[in-house]
Image (spheres, helix red, strand yellow):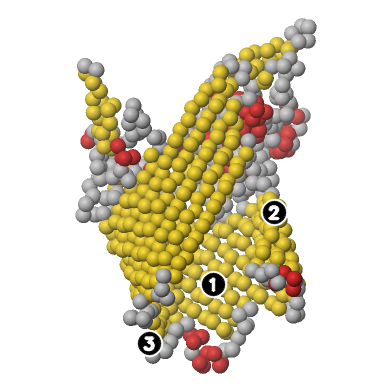
């Protein structure tokens, strides 16, 4: 198993004349990734996370290769493989990728004719190829169900041996790109600074997921058509005494996703700025304020990417799934086209402040932004079913607003001629709110997406755990057979039963932070520099149970709820602590173990219909602070090095992902919602050498 990558790059710059330059560039890479025959290393980590040390050995004493549980057959897929078997007995899977990109550019300076006027044109071609080979085998595997009278293992065959299967696949991708721009910049009368830009681009790219032979056809007729874009944009900037600033911009972009007449979108924007520290009275009266700038921008941008990367959504598509006769398959309408689709547009506004103080030792930037997005692509839901459409058309019906702030601050302090330190920090805070999202008519107001953040997690409100049989009998009907110690849900609509009408907004998007921040610093002493960096998140929540994840069979309770999948699955150490779970007093001998506020409900063997529902019972705090990086470097300067053209050599030792403070504990906080069934984020250490000429 392994991964190797080789890269190369070559550039040639030619000065044809004092005002004309030509640039040639070529770069590329080749990579090869070798994996077990299970094809996906996530399967390996999933098996590792779900395997208890006592479930099965590496190999039985009889020489038989073990499987993960006693379920015979292949229904469980690779989840039934032990990590040892998955790594060593499933064959080999290789993925090769080659990439080559060539670029040519020409630059012409027209300043001898018109001062400040320049032109640049550039063309590029990229070709990428992929080649996969799979040689997969499945060994005969067994599960020991017990021992015979003589003490020998009683073996159940769970997997029949499958001879090596070979398959291969090829992909190709290519892209043409051409751009050109004309720029102008000049200063008039020392007070008026004027610049301009006119930019044009066109792109054409295509990817085919399988290389057809004479006996094959393209997987889709759309795959034969390249994806094309072109656009024209411009900018004019003006500054008076570098104090009053004005920017005017426009973009005129074309997309293939809209019908003729609606393919192009016009997106203007503007920005203004004011730098009062350019005034003489500020320079003289407030000497500690070295720089201060206030800026504001407002404009529009567009989006043409329709959900699911749908192309030509204005066309109605058909397939051969209709009723047939005489051996001929009928044509069926697949997706109804929408001939009134147009660009999704967002109006963006930003207010920012930049400043430098105390001889530029302290500097900071802070921005406040607002994004109002209209015409969001959404598949219609309010079209009545009697029109007969198999799949509803798309429409520009959604709208949403986003807002927030971000900023950074840096402070540099020299202590002596040889000693100085720097500290810095940054943050980003963002929220959003859905203003309009088309839904079928809902029974209750809390079922609508409008007024809530996009991606809001919805589920049941828990009321702790059932205390006793009387508590179960007096409560609304839950799911399946409910006993004391099971999760108790709130009957939101008071109809006496718990169902989808009782799902309410619980939190923001799963595992998505509203606040991100970082801080760090450096200490420099002579030729030594020591640095550190912390990274953190705030306002982040995740769920151990109930979030649909196809990689975990649709329910990520696997790996967290004890015995969720019977024999398959680990049991966490926190479950072994009886104080963390509801335990009947008849078993423990202590009524205090019937804790309605325990971390885990009562133990059950296998899937529990009631306790596996998405609810705030399984919601956890995902905030964390991580020591992202620590570094130490030394710059060596020797007179002997200068004689061979080297000004200095720098040695640097860097450690990354060294430690994390969080409330998750059992998993890395960025992966907690996957219950540890994923490749872990490792600590990394590197030694780096830099030669400065």
> How far, Cα to Cα, is label 3 from label 1?
30 Å
Residue contact between numbered discs 3 and 2, judged by CB atoms under 8 Å: no
455 vs 237: above or below: above
Q: Quadrant of residue 82?
A: top right
Badge number at residue 365: 1
Tell me if I can see residue 626 in this picture. yes
Quickly name the residue at label 3.
188
What residue sits right under mark 2 in the picture?
686
Residue sitting at 55 percent across and 50 percent down?
Answer: 7
Point out the image quarter for the N terminus: top right
Q: Which of marks 3 and 2 is nearer the N terminus?
A: 3
**151 with respect to 644 (left or right):** right
Q: Residue at the spot x=49%, y=87% of the render?
A: 278
What residue do we see at 49% from left, 69% from top? 367
Q: Which residue ends up furthest to the top in the rendered image?
A: 149
Foreground: 46 or 120?
A: 120
Taking depth in this image into account, of 161 and 681 the one nearest to the observer is: 161
Could you tell whether 596 is left or right of 279 in the image? right
**Residue 163 located left or right of residue 435:** right
How packed mark 1 is, by other alpha carbons closer than 10 Å (few <14, some 14-19, many 20 or more), is: some
Residue drawn at 66 percent across, 75 percent down = 412
């Amino acid at each position: 198993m392994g991964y190797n990558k080789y890269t190369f790059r070559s550039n040639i710059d030619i000065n044809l004349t004092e005002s004309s330059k030509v640039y040639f560039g070529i770069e590329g890479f080749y990579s090869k990734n070798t994996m077990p025959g299970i094809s996906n290393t996530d399967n390996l980590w999933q098996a590792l996370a779900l395997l208890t040390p006592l479930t099965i050995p590496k190999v039985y004493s009889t020489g038989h290769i073990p499987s993960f549980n006693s379920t015979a057959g292949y229904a469980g897929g690779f989840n039934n493989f032990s990590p040892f078997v998955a790594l060593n007995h499933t064959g080999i899977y290789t993925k090769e990728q080659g990439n080559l990109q060539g670029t040519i550019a020409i630059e012409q300076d027209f300043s001898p004719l018109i001062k400040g006027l320049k032109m640049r044109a550039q063309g590029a071609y990229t070709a990428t190829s992929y080649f996969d080979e799979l040689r997969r085998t499945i060994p005969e595997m067994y599960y020991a169900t017990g021992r015979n009278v003589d003490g020998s293992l009683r073996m159940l065959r769970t997997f029949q041996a499958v001879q090596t299967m070979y398959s291969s696949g090829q992909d190709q991708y290519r892209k043409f790109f051409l751009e050109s721009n004309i720029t102008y910049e000049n200063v008039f009368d020392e007070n008026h600074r004027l610049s301009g830009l006119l930019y044009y681009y066109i792109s054409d790219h295509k990817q085919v997921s399988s290389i057809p032979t004479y006996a094959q056809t393209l997987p889709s007729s759309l795959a034969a058509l390249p994806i094309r874009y072109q656009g024209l944009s411009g900018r004019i900037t003006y500054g008076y005494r570098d104090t009053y600033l004005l920017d005017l911009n426009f973009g005129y972009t074309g997309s293939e996703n809209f019908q003729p007449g609606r393919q192009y979108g016009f997106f203007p924007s503007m920005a203004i700025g004011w730098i009062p520290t350019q005034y003489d009275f500020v320079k003289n009266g407030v000497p500690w304020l070295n720089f201060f700038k206030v800026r504001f921008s407002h404009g529009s941008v567009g989006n043409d990417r329709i959900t699911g990367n749908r192309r030509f959504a204005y066309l109605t598509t058909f397939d051969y799934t209709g009723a047939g006769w005489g051996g001929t398959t009928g044509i069926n309408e697949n997706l109804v086209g929408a001939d009134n689709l147009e660009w999704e547009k967002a109006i963006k506004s930003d207010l920012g402040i930049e400043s430098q103080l105390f001889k530029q030792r302290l500097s900071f930037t802070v921005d406040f932004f607002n994004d109002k997005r209209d015409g969001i692509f959404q598949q219609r839901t309010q079209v009545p079913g009697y029109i007969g459409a198999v799949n509803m058309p798309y429409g520009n019906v959604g709208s949403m607003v986003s807002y927030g702030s971000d900023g950074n601050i840096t402070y540099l302090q020299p202590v002596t001629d040889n000693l100085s330190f720097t500290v810095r920090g940054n943050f980003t805070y963002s929220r959003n709110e859905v203003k309009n999202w088309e839904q079928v008519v809902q029974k209750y107001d809390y079922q609508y997406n409008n007024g809530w953040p996009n991606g809001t997690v919805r589920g049941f409100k828990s009321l702790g755990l059932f205390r006793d049989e009387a508590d179960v009998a007096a409560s609304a009907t839950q799911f399946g057979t409910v006993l004391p110690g099971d999760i108790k849900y709130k009957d939101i609509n008071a109809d006496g039963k718990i169902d989808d009408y009782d799902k309410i907004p619980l939190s923001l998007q799963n595992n998505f932070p509203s606040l991100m921040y970082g801080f760090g610093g450096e200490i420099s002493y002579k030729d030594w520099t020591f640095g550190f960096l912390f990274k953190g998140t705030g306002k982040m929540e995740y769920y151990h149970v109930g979030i649909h994840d196809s990689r975990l069979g649709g329910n990520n309770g696997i790996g967290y709820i004890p015995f969720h999948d019977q024999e398959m699955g680990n049991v966490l150490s926190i479950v072994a602590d009886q104080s963390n779970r509801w335990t009947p007093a008849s078993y423990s001998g202590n009524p205090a173990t019937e804790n309605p506020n325990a971390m885990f409900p009562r133990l059950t063997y296998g899937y529990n219909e009631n306790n596996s529902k998405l609810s705030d019972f399984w919601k956890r705090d995902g905030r964390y602070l991580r020591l992202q990086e620590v570094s130490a470097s030394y710059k060596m300067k020797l007179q002997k090095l200068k004689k061979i053209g080297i000004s200095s050599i720098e040695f640097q030792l860097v450690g990354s992902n060294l430690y994390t403070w969080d409330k998750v504990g059992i998993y890395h906080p960025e992966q907690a919602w996957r219950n540890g069934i994923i490749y872990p984020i490792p600590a990394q250490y590197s030694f780096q050498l830099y030669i400065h000429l």
